[in-house]
């Protein structure tokens, strides 16, 4: 089976290296040689293990290629290229989560009975796609909760361990290669959101796009939030959450406070972890590296082995027929909330805050006032509410922003029990 690599970067080179290094093992597993014969790259690769060219048409026109492995990144160009490949009934493997977040329905229709693998698009080396599609296919998935972005998890872990500020840790992550020069895609939650949509499609047959769901990143988490979390035995993690509520599906991506005894709270550094709760199995946890050349290559090659085995490609995204599930409106999210606000230190401020909460059906579970430094004219207040609706908390935040005694923007985080 001959393959072409579209995008010979870190992952593409790792795929080729692994296929050549483990060729005997791979042939033993699928009874066929998987041979990388050509790669596409913008720039020359003098140390490449296979021929590398920059002419996409030359690669696509080769009739001897059985599978095209798309590792280019981006959305529009890869979609155009993969569409052409699938129309020719050639198999495709991709690691492109952004592409699938926006175009998975069109690609599913184009693929039909043509093999289409995408295990590497979510959580790198963790085989979560196959777990949901096959291993847990007898289960109604009650919930999925995952640490889906290693950059964000590293930042929050180091802020917690070292009592460090966000910008300090971000700079260190960039120096170590854990964060891009422009880290927006990771730290603002978009990367995790793309992955969550793919998992939700498999688990629930839910056809929505990133713009339809709640997405928040970690850039506004402060060392004061870390301080509060430690005081009350919480850990802050950036989570992708999908769960059933009243026959609708709640999808959200944001920082959340977790009790320190939760399994996900113990996942640190650049690692990923996904907790899946099935109605038959119960909760199971999947842990491992979520990015990097070798981890992603492992998942890409697993798809190639499946294709070489000529396994049937029905139900690419888990369902042959449409399901009845609908997306829950963001306003109907129902959970506990954490609030941090800086206010002028004067009589009546706390009373006014609690009055506003009461007016919007919000009650206080926990309250803490951080000790004030000498000569400060403001206080930092922390609240945890009882369960309430997202709509109520957003109205409250807007009302608080209008108060003269509030000095900085109000910060809110959801608590995942």
Image: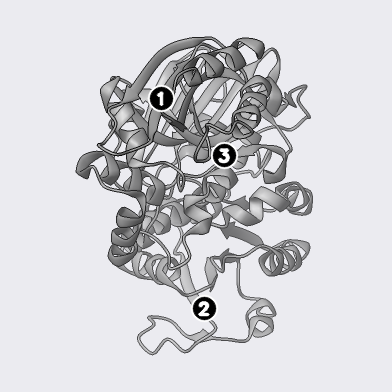
Q: Quadrant of residue 258?
A: top left
Q: Residue at x 63, y 86 (%)?
A: 55
> Dot 3: within a 10 Å radius of its alpha carbon, few (fewer than 14), some, or many (20 or more) residues?
many
Position of the C terminus by quadrant: top left
Q: In the image, residue 276 lies at what x, y percent?
A: 47, 25
Indicate which disc residue 32 carries. none
Residue that label 1 marks:
382
Residue at image coords 57%, 25%: 137
Of residue 21 and residue 364, the one placed in the foreground of this image is 364
Q: Is residue 312 above or below residue 342?
A: below
Asked if the residue at tag 2 contacts the one at tag 3, i.e. Cβ–Cβ closer than 8 Å, the answer is no
| Image spot of residue 106 (x, y percent) | 78, 51
**First in residue order: circle 3 vs circle 2:** 2
* Residue 230 locus on image (x, y percent): 27, 27
Circle 3 SS class: helix
User: In the picture provided, is 90 more to the left or to the right than 137?
Assistant: right
Question: In this rendering, which labeled residue sits more in front, label 1 or label 2?
Answer: 1
Q: Which residue is mark 2?
A: 39
Q: Residues within 10 Å of mark 2 (few under 14, many from 20)?
A: many
SS at circle 2: strand
Which class describes the residues within 10 Å of circle 1: few (<14), some (14-19), or many (20+)?
many
**Placement of 75 over or under 394, stated as above or below:** below
Give the residue pinned by disc 3.
Answer: 196
Q: Which residue is situated farthest in the left direction here? A: 162
């Amino acid at each position: 089976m001959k393959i072409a690599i579209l995008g010979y970067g870190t992952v593409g080179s790792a795929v080729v290296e692994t296929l050549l290094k483990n060729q005997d093992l791979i042939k033993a597993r699928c009874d066929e040689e998987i041979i990388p014969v050509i790669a596409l790259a913008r720039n020359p690769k003098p140390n490449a293990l296979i021929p590398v060219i920059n002419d996409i048409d030359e690669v696509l026109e080769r009739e001897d290629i059985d599978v095209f492995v798309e590792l280019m990144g981006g959305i529009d160009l890869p979609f155009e290229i993969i569409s052409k490949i699938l129309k020719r009934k050639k198999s495709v493997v991709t690691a492109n989560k952004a592409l699938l977040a926006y175009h998975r329905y069109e690609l599913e229709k184009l693929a039909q009975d043509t093999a289409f693998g995408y295990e590497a698009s979510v959580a790198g080396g963790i085989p979560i796609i196959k777990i949901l599609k096959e291993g847990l296919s007898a289960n109604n998935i009650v919930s999925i909760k995952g640490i889906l972005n290693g950059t964000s998890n590293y930042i929050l872990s180091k802020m917690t361990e070292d009592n460090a500020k966000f910008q300090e840790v971000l700079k260190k992550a960039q120096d170590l290669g854990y964060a891009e020069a422009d880290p927006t895609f990771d730290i603002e939650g978009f990367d995790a959101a793309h992955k969550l949509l793919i998992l939700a499609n498999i688990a629930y047959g839910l056809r929505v796009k990133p713009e339809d769901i709640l997405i928040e990143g970690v850039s506004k988490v402060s060392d004061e939030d870390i301080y509060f979390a430690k005081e009350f035995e919480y850990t802050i993690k950036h989570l992708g959450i999908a769960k059933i509520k009243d026959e609708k599906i709640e999808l959200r991506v944001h920082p959340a406070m977790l009790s320190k005894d939760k399994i996900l709270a113990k996942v640190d550094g650049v690692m990923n972890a996904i907790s899946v709760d099935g109605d038959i199995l119960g909760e199971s946890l999947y842990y491992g590296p979520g990015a990097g050349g070798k981890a992603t290559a492992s998942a890409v090659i697993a798809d190639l082995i499946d294709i070489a085995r000529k396994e049937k490609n029905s139900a690419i995204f888990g369902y042959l027929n449409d399901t009845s599930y609908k997306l829950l409106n963001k306003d109907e999210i129902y959970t506990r909330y954490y609030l941090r606000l800086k206010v002028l230190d004067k009589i009546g401020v706390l009373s006014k805050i609690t009055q506003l909460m009461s007016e919007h059906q919000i009650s206080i579970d926990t309250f803490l006032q951080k000790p004030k430094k000498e000569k400060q004219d403001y206080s930092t207040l922390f609240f945890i509410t009882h369960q309430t609706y997202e709509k109520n908390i957003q109205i409250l935040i807007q009302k608080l922003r209008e108060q003269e005694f509030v000095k900085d923007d109000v910060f809110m985080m959801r608590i995942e029990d």
